[in-house]
Amino acid sequence: AQSVTQLGSHVSVSEGALVLLRCNYSSSVPPYLFWYVQYPNQGLQLLLKYTSAATLVKGINGFEAEFKKSETSFHLTKPSAHMSDAAEYFCAVTLLADFGNEKLTFGTGTRLTIIP
Amino acid sequence: GAVVSQHPSRVICKSGTSVKIECRSLDFQATTMFWYRQFPKQSLMLMATSNEGSKATYEQGVEKDKFLINHASLTLSTLTVTSAHPEDSSFYICSSKRRNYNEQFFGPGTRLTVL
């Protein structure tokens, strides 16, 4: 079974500062990993995904994440925070071994607050 | 491309009534659809997985007679909350997946409030 752990339910950074949201995964087979963003009362939007290709993945809105197998981590970063980045961020994992009904397992989420 | 819609976006109903939520993939054929439930300030919890033309597979602890899922076509899945009660109030989100693609596309969600 797979799982993800997001360290820090709330993260606050100043506008223009580095954003770092942490995600560690647990999986018995090579995983697919995702980061999603959710704005209030909206669905989820995919930021980026790791699917066993390049370990450094670039996504939308200037976000990127690095897959580190040795650390079982997939932390999300952005060099310079913008006020519009304030939202809830979810890390998710699924198994790439099965192209059938693979299920996404979500972390508990991290609320990002940007301080003006 | 890969747009998923949900209808309605918000619904308020009285306790004991049934509510139907639609999930549509607008520009692709969804071989698999997923239904999630999200309580305030919590993560998404998978309720069930449905494939077109077959019965839904429910996660442990989800009452299939309470949450009826129908996936009648490759573009439409419906979730019916039967005899709704206040504890069913939640944000329900669907997602759709194409065959051989490893990404789910999420709908905007439906907020259900049961009075």
Image (spheres, coloured by chain):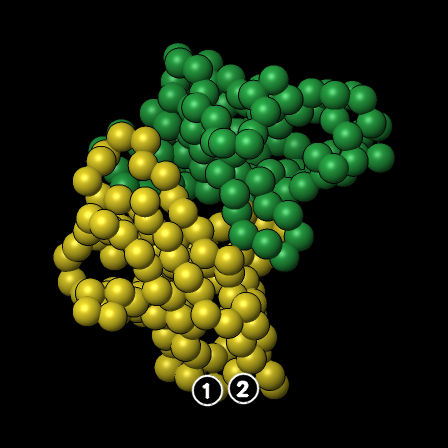
Type of the residue with mark 1? Ala
The colour applied to the residues of chain A in this rendering is yellow
Establish if A98 lies above or below B76.
below
Q: Quadrant of the C terminus of chain B?
A: top right
Q: Which colour represents chain B?
A: green
| In the depicted structure, whether residue B109 falls above or below residue A81 | above
Q: Residue at x 42, y 61 (%)?
A: A5
Q: For the residue marked with disc 2, what is the amino acid?
A: Ser
Q: Answer yes or no: do the residues labelled 1 and 2 have beta carbons within 8 Å?
A: yes
Of A37 and A100, nearer the camera is A100
Disc marking residue A14: 2
Provide the chain ID for the residue under circle 2: A
Given residues A48 and B16, the one toward you in this image is B16
Q: Quadrant of the N terminus of chain B?
A: top left
Looking at the image, which residue is at 22% across and 36% down?
Answer: A98
Label 2 crowd bin: few (<14), some (14–19), many (20+), radius 10 Å: some
How many numbered tags mark residues here? 2
- Residue where numbered disc 1 is placed: A17
